[in-house]
Amino acid sequence: MHSFRYWALPLWLFAALVLSLAGARAQDRAQPLPPREGPSEWSERLALDRRLTFHSLGSRTALSVLDGEGARGPSEVVEDRAAALYALGAAQVAAERPRLESVARLGPEPERRAALYALGEMGLGEPLFLQIAREEPPEMASAAFLGLVLARSRSLGTFAAELLGARPELEAHVASIGAFVRQPGERAALVQPDRVDEYLDLRWRAAREHGLIGGQSWRGLVLRDLADDETFVDEVVLPSLATVRHPGARDHLASLLVEHPSPSVFAACMDVLPAELERILSAGLFTPPDATYWDRAVAAIERRGPAAADSEVLTRALAVEGVARRAAALLAEVGEASGWLALGPDLASPDATRRAFAARALGASEEPTREAELERLALDPDPRVRAAALVGRLRHGERRATEEARDRLTEEGVDTAALVAELLDVRRAPRVRALLEEFLPSFSGEVRLRAALSLCLPGRIGPRDVVREALANGQTGPYGAAAVRVLSDTPSQEEIDLLHAVFPSAGDRALNAEAARALLSVQHPSGTIFLRAALWRAPWHRSVLAGHLLASQGGLHALLDELDSAPAGASSRDLRRIGFAIGSWGGPQQVEVLARRRPANDPALQGAYLGALSSRTY
């Protein structure tokens, strides 16, 4: 290995710094969205790093992580605080120099190193760099040396030779930092790459949360990708149509299903026009091409609870492999004999999972044999089946079952764990809710969150504080999505701010869809972006539906404002769709208003005339 003593340190360091660290970094808005943790390939990491920039506005979010209140801070996660500290330095926030110097001396190690890099980006802290490099262990000493490089210190060359003479154990670290600055495209030259890897990763995390990537924020890039995803736009916008009272909306949604079918459109039809959907299916106008459609529809019914109006569609789902048993359970719950006929034989299955599912459905039903069967299942060898049987008895008001469940919850063991799991899976059962409410203070972690989610039914006061806390602490996955769904029910301003803070969550599609729907319902800009995406893009029926939804939220003036601020690339067909929505919603009177504002050959006015004519049939 070559020694640094023989290198012309100032020459190559300053030349490389001028080329690779100084000045504005390249911005390319057309680049694809990087993965949340950044790319793994070295060349991609370097290319991404050249697209990162920092600005003073981003320092506000960094300060909220360090000092703030509410959903975005203060954070106790060391990695988050380290990224925020670096962002302050990269954004040249000179007022934060005392904080950075204090953390660099006394903070936790990852934060100390981040503060050193931040001071280096600001061109400050040289005495501190020299002291730490001379006196502290290799991890901190090498970070201080990298800080000195970032600061473009004039004493770098002399000090490097002095440092290696006094501390030869740092040679691999110093050589790797030098090789990175001199020729960053060759990772193989980095004998000890820890500091370089840490620096690149830190810059990425800081830019993702507090800076810009190719001139855009991480949030903006994720929103762009989601708004370009037609399926996601459908998942956000179409369920919201349940709030639209214009009769034409039902026709457009039915036409959308026939002309541009998707699982999202099918599920929306289940919620918005179940009777019309049954007629469409019976007439053979549309047949779901695969089980995905049925899975989405059954999931929608499971979330809101089955009703008698769902029976026809659920009966059709009995013939679909993969959703048949779930459909049968829902049918049994609304008292349809066909549901229990499909599930009853599973009580004798050798598969305990099938027996437990059937026992759960039986407990939610009104079958005449329910009580006797549940008593028999209480002796089943599998704890899941015994728990399902006990909860079935409990939900129908059997006092002995209530006392037995209460006693079980004060114990520990397999049966208790199975009972808790079963209670958490039960929907809309008052006696189960009462028991969960009683024992909520004794639960912790995921069980506590799931119990709180079960208790926060729409229109009811529940432990929303538990849900808010979990979401603010980064809960994702199915329970994160469920938490968002709970808070979307008449949210407070604090909850709206929290929903905005957690959205978008890269890679968590279910949570993103729930959050976007919630934000759209309160007309937050992060939600209306998807309404605008649906409004200004084909297909025709979805665009008009988006127009109706916009008018139902903000009145006709909201549609007119959209027309006046049309996107630069809007075509005459796009304008005609918006005009159609205005005419069909506002009728002939609104067409007259529009005619005074636009020439006779304007595509929007043409569409408005057609829309007004269509509204005469309602």
Image (cartoon, rainbow, N blue to C red):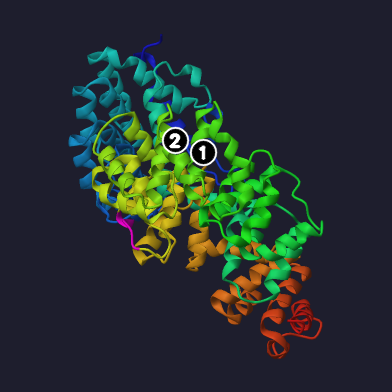
Please name the residue shown 53% across and 52% down the image: 333
Above/below status of 191 relative to 511? above
Which residue in the rendered view is the most extreme toward the top? Answer: 1
The image quarter in which residue 535 lies = bottom right
Residues 186 and 316: in front is 316
Q: Nearer the viewer, residue 231 or 166?
A: 231
Helix, strand or loop status at disc 2: helix
- Gap between marks 2 and 1, in whole Å? 15 Å
Q: Quadrant of residue 244?
A: bottom right
- Residue 253 visible: yes
Residue 539, above or below 222: below
Nearer-the-camera pick, 597 or 86: 597
- The label shown at residue 376 is 2
Q: x and y percent of residue 100 in the render?
A: 24, 43
Task: Give the residues in magenta.
Answer: 461-465
**Dot in front, 2 or 1:** 2
Q: How would you classify the magenta stretch by its main secondary structure?
A: loop
Residue at 55% x, 77% y: name it: 554
Depth check: 33 or 543 in front? Answer: 543
Residue 529 in the image, given as x and y percentages of width and height? 56, 62
Q: Is residue 217 visible?
A: no
Q: Residue 83 is drawn in which quadrant?
A: top left
Residue 15's x, y, as percent?
45, 31
Q: Residues within 10 Å of mark 2 (few under 14, many from 20)?
A: few
- Picture disc at residue 357: 1
- Mark 2 residue type: Arg
Q: Amino acid at mark 1?
A: Phe
Q: Position of residue 1 (x, y in %)?
A: 41, 8
